[in-house]
Amino acid sequence: MNKTQQLHAWLLLLPALVMLAAFTHIPAVQTLLHSFYDNPRGGNPASFVGMENFQYLYEDEVFWQVLWNNAWYAIVTVPVSIVLALVMALWVNARLPGRGIVRLAYFTPTVLPMIAVANIWLFFYTPEIGLFNNVLNMFGFDGQNWLGDPDFALPSLMVMTIWKEAGFFMIFYLAALQGLDNSLYEAAAIENASRWQVFRRITWPLLMPTTLFILINALINAFKLVDHLFILTKGGPNNASNLLLYYIYENAFSFFDSAYAATLTSVMLIILALLAWVQFGILDKRVHYR
Amino acid sequence: MISLLKNDAAAVHQSLHEQISWAEKLAAWVLGLLWILPLLFAFWAAFHPAEYTTSFDFFAPLTLEHFVSAWEQAPFAAYMFNTLGITTLILACQLVLCTLAGYALARVPFRGQGIVMALVMMQLMVMPEVLIVENYRTLAELNLIDTWTGVGLPYMASAFGIFLMRQTFAMVPQALDDAARVEGCNRLQVLWRVYVPQAKPVYLAYGLVSISYHWNNFLWPLVVTNTEASRPLTVGMAIFGAPESGVDWPVICAGTLIAVSPLLAAFLIFQKQFVQSFMRAGIK
């Protein structure tokens, strides 16, 4: 480790570190700081207000509803997309006629912009002429006002999210499946193990690291992917389908309350820090694949 | 783990394909059909007269009128030009920044390496989307609101890219590095002549993942763009499809197809590379 080498290393890292600091580290710290200040008003700069914003947050019913929505959204969409992704991967990894086409179909939502396909999904959900209600009517059921009914708005968003995510996660399972060691399966065949036994005893344990990797990514996505809200529900009706990042956006750019937006972003940062801690502190230590 | 994919193991996974029942095969196909249904529907609605939007008649006449009116109602050419410009700008900067940083982390030992790595990895959790409020403030101070650079800046140093390049460069044999040194190459020349050529497939993989991410990115561009001068396709689509703008369904479907067609075409042509890229990129 001589001096020139150290200098070279830092020079090579400099551009990337400057950008990371400017758009990740400094703004993250600024967010935490700003959550203790109020909004600058009429030429007066923002003043320190201590825990006032957090007091407001604690009493803000919409915040609790949004947090609750987001928790539900994660609890439903994450496991369902992971299970679907695994089933898809097992299917397109098996002897299936037209395997390439099926794999392509599963993967297509991943390359389509959420915002553009949300327009199509909006049509599916439309009460009068929408596809879902047409299908329901065909079987003699009454249609629903999917996006306008507080009970159905959030589940409707979940369905679209699962559609968008499952094919993406499938790819990681597929990669893992194709990298698995064959000899274990040959041994299982000699032992006459049933398909379920093979899956339960060999495939699933070997896929564990992939599952955890997907799990963390899916959880992060559950908090950062809100594009479809802009088209489908705008968080409504009456915040029934509002999610944390969308609420942050609303506060910052619709209500122009950047102090409260910073407070909400702090909550988001705490959630992400917890996820990071779970991943690097606990899971990575217990599951090692090499 | 990347090495596992490099040899593509066609022979290995051939024997792994297990037999499944016809019921499962059917289920796999039905699910596949469900998954492309939105896209199929968009094609149906966009190419047929409005009265056939909800009634599926095999002999319905074809028409291009919806594409014409979509094209007339929104400046798609300008949006597409912006998306292309922004995506290219981001990718070009990412490739340079991630290559330099990845190389330093893989092959130039220095004090504080662990801390730098941890600082980089933080961005995997705290993506620019989360920090829209503060980043908007920064961009406003830099006078970069409503510019391509403004849309691109927060994404140019990508933790994912740095990590991917570090992993790739760390697997290049040290002997090649030493040999180039003996011949008198300096550090940047070694990087350019030895490491970069070895990492070509990873660059392709990263490029495809980055392009499809930024082609589809919405929230940050929405916040930071105001006019047609910098507005990308996704933001344009959101305005175009808004109920207030009073556009009817077939036209929205036609607009959607216009917006997704370049990426969709690229995806269909390079589907093998796309799928492999996402697989390669996801494995660490």
Image (cartoon, coloured by chain):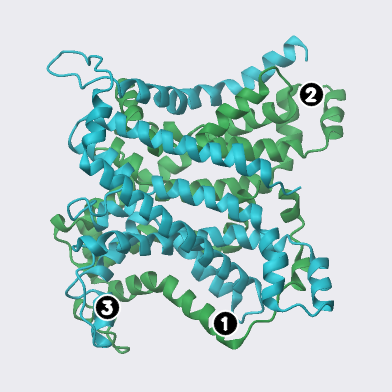
Chain colours: A cyan, B green
Observer-nearest residue: B127 or A12? Answer: B127
Question: Sequence order check: which comes first, mark 1 or mark 3?
Answer: 1
Q: Read off the chain for label 2.
A: B
Residue drawn at x 34%, y 24% as measured from the top left:
B138
Marks 3 and 1: in contact by CB < 8 Å?
no
Dots 1 and 2 on the same chain: yes
Q: Helix, strand, or loop for circle 3?
A: loop
Percent coordinates x, y for residue B223 in the rendering: 29, 38
Q: Residue at x 55, y 35 (%)?
A: B159
* Tag 1 secondary structure: helix
Q: Which mark is residue B48?
A: 3
- Residue type pointed to by label 2: Cys
| A247 is higher (above) or lower (below) than A140 | above
Question: Same subunit under labels 1 and 3?
Answer: yes
C-alpha separation, residue under disc 1 versus residue under disc 3: 34 Å
* Quarter holding residue A184: bottom right
Amino acid type of the residue tagged 1 in the rendering: Glu
Instruction: State the image quarter where residue A183 is shown.
Output: bottom right
**Chain containing mark 3:** B
Residue type highlighted by circle 3: His
Question: Residues under labels 1 and 2: Cα distance?
Answer: 58 Å
Residue A140 visible in the displayed image: yes
Marks 3 and 2 share the same chain: yes
Q: Residues within 10 Å of mark 3 (few under 14, many from 20)?
A: many
Does B102 appear above or below A136? above
- The chain to which mark 1 is attached is B
Task: State the mark number for residue B185.
Answer: 2
Q: For this view, does A273 lie left or right of residue A212? A: left
In what element is the residue under mark 2? loop
Label 1 sits on residue: B24
